Amino acid sequence: MKQLIVSCEAASLQAALLEDRKLVEHEAQHPSETQRAGSIYIGRVVNVLPGMQAAFVDIGLDKNAFLYIDDVLPVNMQKQPKTKPPIGDLLQPGQRVLVQVVKEPEGSKGARVTTHYSIPGRWLVYMPGAGYTAVSRKIEAEEEKVRLKQVADNLRCGEEGLILRTVSEGRSEEELRRDLLDLRELWTVIEQRAEAGAAPACIYQDLELLPRLARDVITEDVLEIWVDDEAVHAELQGLLRQRSPELAARVRLDGGDTPLFERFGIAEELSRSQRRKMWLPSGGYLVIDPTEALTVIDVNTGRFTGTSSLEQTVFRTNMEAAAEIPRLLRLRNLRGIIIVDFIDMEQSAHRDRVLECMAEAVKKDRSKTILLGWTKLGLLEITRKRK
């Protein structure tokens, strides 16, 4: 069972998603913070770096954004040159360029930007100029994939690109058409702002937390939605009523004395989940070390000594870790390259079971997560899309 808990306290808004009463996702919106990822800017090229095939772009933030040549070349593969030209042939200092943030500024690094624009809707992702259609890999029924692709191919015009999101499964052609029309209209507005605006300037921002929850998180399998603020309750109901009165009816206003995050154990779990050392049910534990380049997760037996054999002790610990790690990837929003050092297993069948457990668990992740498999050193390689 999925539950969404939305709490408003001291002008900050927080949302927590629970699956079978376990916390799996957490988002917060503070008045002093602005989400940059997904936003589109009119930028100005500051300098071009031939040796790196990249450029720095002023988009109006404290640090200049970084633009790779791969993000400048046409997104449509058929229009890309056979060999990459020098970055200086494409960009010049002082040039205006429309870019979208794909990675937030972090530490000493500025944002990473692209000219491959994508705008998410309720059922679709709209990509002007991409020239192809694609269907979410999480939709498993082959017949439904074929149907959705045919619908998208019929709907898209010219060089438009469309991705059918996982939630588009079972949606009618008319629902998809309405979503596409809204996205086309939005892109037209963005183009008009880009033409009239001065650089640097932000001309489009992705939705704030509540509309984003209504668009991306609240689906038919979210059975309970609890809110502790009357204004937030009314706004969320209004957002959902536009497309699904049934979902709007699930939004409940909490009038209890105990704060929602305490009543559902969210506050305690948030604190526990950020620790470097995370205990597993049997007594084993994980050590999570994020670095600038990648995140390393080490699995240990800890206090667990088992009952029958070393292989069974190791296997049980690894299976518990395989179930817990995907949840922590979502909850802590760990992204990029992730390396998991499971305890060595002698039996290949046990390694296969651990990998299957991980693969099943990452299906629930809204961010694209890929299990690349075991390295020669017995490490599991994972990539998780930055968002």
Image: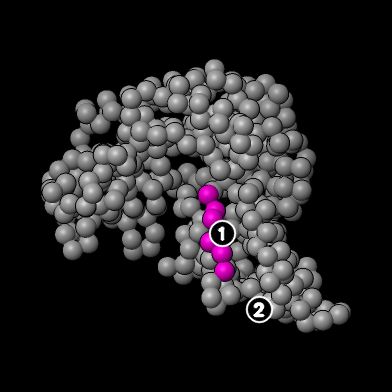
76 versus 239 height, above or below: below
Near-viewer residue (61 or 302): 302
Give the number of marks. 2
129 versus 31 height, above or below: above
Residue 300 at least partly seen: no
In the figure, is residue 114 to the left or right of 387? left
Q: Which residues are magenta?
A: 368-374
Q: Indicate which disc, 1 or 2, sits on the residue closer to the N terminus.
A: 2
In the figure, is residue 260 to the left or right of 134? right
Amino acid type assigned to the residue bearing label 1 in the image: Leu
In the figure, is residue 123 to the left or right of 187? right
Name the residue rendered at 78%, 40% in the picture. 256
Residue 27 at least partly seen: yes
Question: Label 1 neighbourhood size at 10 Å, few (<14), some (14-19), many (20+)?
Answer: some
Colour scheme in use: one colour
Q: Which secondary structure type mostly characterizes the magenta part of the structure?
A: strand
**Residue linked to disc 1:** 371
Distance between the Cα atoms at labels 1 and 2?
A: 18 Å
Near-viewer residue (377 or 50): 377
Q: Quadrant of the N terminus?
A: top right
Q: Is residue 356 magenta?
A: no
Near-viewer residue (347 or 344): 347
Name the residue rendered at 39%, 59% in the picture. 106
In the figure, is residue 72 to the left or right of 239? left
Question: Label 2 neighbourhood size at 10 Å, few (<14), some (14-19), many (20+)?
Answer: some
Q: Is residue 371 magenta?
A: yes
Q: Secondary structure at mark 1?
A: strand
| Whole-percent x, y for residue 145 in the image | 57, 34
**Residue linked to disc 2:** 344
Q: Residue 211's image quarter?
A: top right
Amino acid type assigned to the residue bearing label 2 in the image: Asp
Name the residue rendered at 51%, 33% in the picture. 164
